[in-house]
Image (cartoon, grey):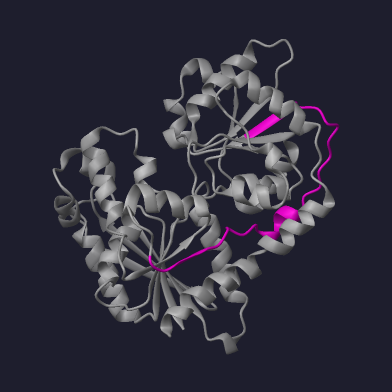
Amino acid sequence: MKILTNIRFFKLAGIAQTLSSLSSYVQKQSDSKKLELVGVEIIRSNDPKAMPSVKESKENSFKVITAAIPHPDIKDLIKRTKNIANVQDALDPIVDQYQEIICHEKPDAVLLNGTYYLPWCLFLAAKNIVKNIVLHYHGSLTKETEHYPEPMKMIFRQMEKIFDSDRLRYIFPSLLAKNTVAKEVFRREPKHFCVLPNPIPLHFFNAVKKTDGLARHIGAIVRWRHIKNISFIERFAVHNAHLIKGVTLNILTDLMTVANVPSHVRRLVKFARPMESTRLARFYSKMDVVICPSRFETYGNVAQEAVACGTPALISKNMGVAETFKKFGIDRWITDFSSPAGVLHAIEAAAADEVGIGLRQELKNELNPDRIHGMLLNYVMSGQN
């Protein structure tokens, strides 16, 4: 069976981490599985007059097709456009490229990852060609853009609403994700879906954690975006700076966005560059507590990766991973991020807590990549029946 999917190589994106893990799983399968994964990466060409260029590479059962295509920046496009039809016209070169690749590869299934404009274009390209299409819901355009000006919000909502189709089956990483999409995006229950949490790469369980129960180093891994509740991080940094014995706040983010951080806040935190997943374990294990204050997450890989490394993670109730925390008895780390002083108190309590060996083993058993990816691929392939 051949599955075609959109990919994006970006260190801070949870979708990239999940896809990297999936591709590794596929490559480990024996020839008897007859499973091939084709990942299509669309890159925005800086030359608007350039012709699309396509490159291919293959390792075992994983083929990567990279296409550089001139197209407008999506936010700039939506700022100056009037309706979703104009957006589709502007992105037709991407849709056409996807269609050409689909016709050449002849996949048995298309797996859409996320709801941004690239999986949107892939759906438009595939819906009249491929019978078996599955959307793995990562993020929500409606939630990500809820603070945008109304005309932009409307178009982004329309873009996500196009995924409301009986041509699609859905994989949601949490019930929170499914319920939010049903209520705020589709305005109806999806017809065919399953709920499957994201896996934890096994290297996180190899981290060695040493702690004295004190809160000194606090970590956060965020894209510097409104939905990640960066306003809380800024308020927490200012509050912490006025304390006699404060903590060190370590922020791992795309440093290109640091220029957007207020100058007085930049002086109060330590910034680190994004790093490969295999190096993240060391970052987590050095932290006494990791905080995840997001306003909304369909899941939230950072929190469970930190716990797998032995580091407590404080999370918002508006994150899908809260369901995992409840299942494994660590819902005491679900926190209200309205007050920096209150969160600091929760940090001190969490730092004195312990992530036991038993908990880490339970997470490893339940959320190991082989188990989760096996279930995911079984669901995708079930559409062939």
Is 114 on the left or on the right of 377, as rendered? left
Above or below, 129 relative to 79: below
Q: Position of residue 282 (x, y in %)?
A: 72, 44
Please check the rendered image and state whether residue 29 is part of the magenta-colored stretch, yes or no. Answer: no
Going by the image, does 93 lie left or right of 172? left
In the image: residue 199, left or right of residue 157: right
How far from the left and from the top, in percent, is residue 99? 26, 72
Between residues 47 and 210, which one lies in front from this camera angle? 210
What residue lies at 51% left-to-right and 54% top-to-bottom? Answer: 175
Q: Residue 328 at what x, y percent from top left?
A: 71, 51
**Residue occupying the far bottom of the picture:** 32
Could you tell me what secondary structure mostly forms the magenta stretch? loop
201 magenta-colored: yes
The one nearer the camera, 361 or 342, is 342
Q: Quadrant of residue 339?
A: top right
Quarter of the image for residue 384 reads bottom left
Q: Residue at x 39, y 52 (%)?
A: 181
Q: Residue furthest right?
A: 212
Which sits in the foreground, 264 or 230?
230
Q: Number of callouts in the render?
A: 0
Determine the residue positioned at 81% across, 32% down. Answer: 352
Q: Quadrant of the C terminus?
A: bottom left
Q: Is residue 375 visible?
A: yes
The magenta-colored residue range is 191-219
- Report if residue 139 is visible in the image: no
Q: Position of residue 37 (x, y in %)?
A: 47, 74
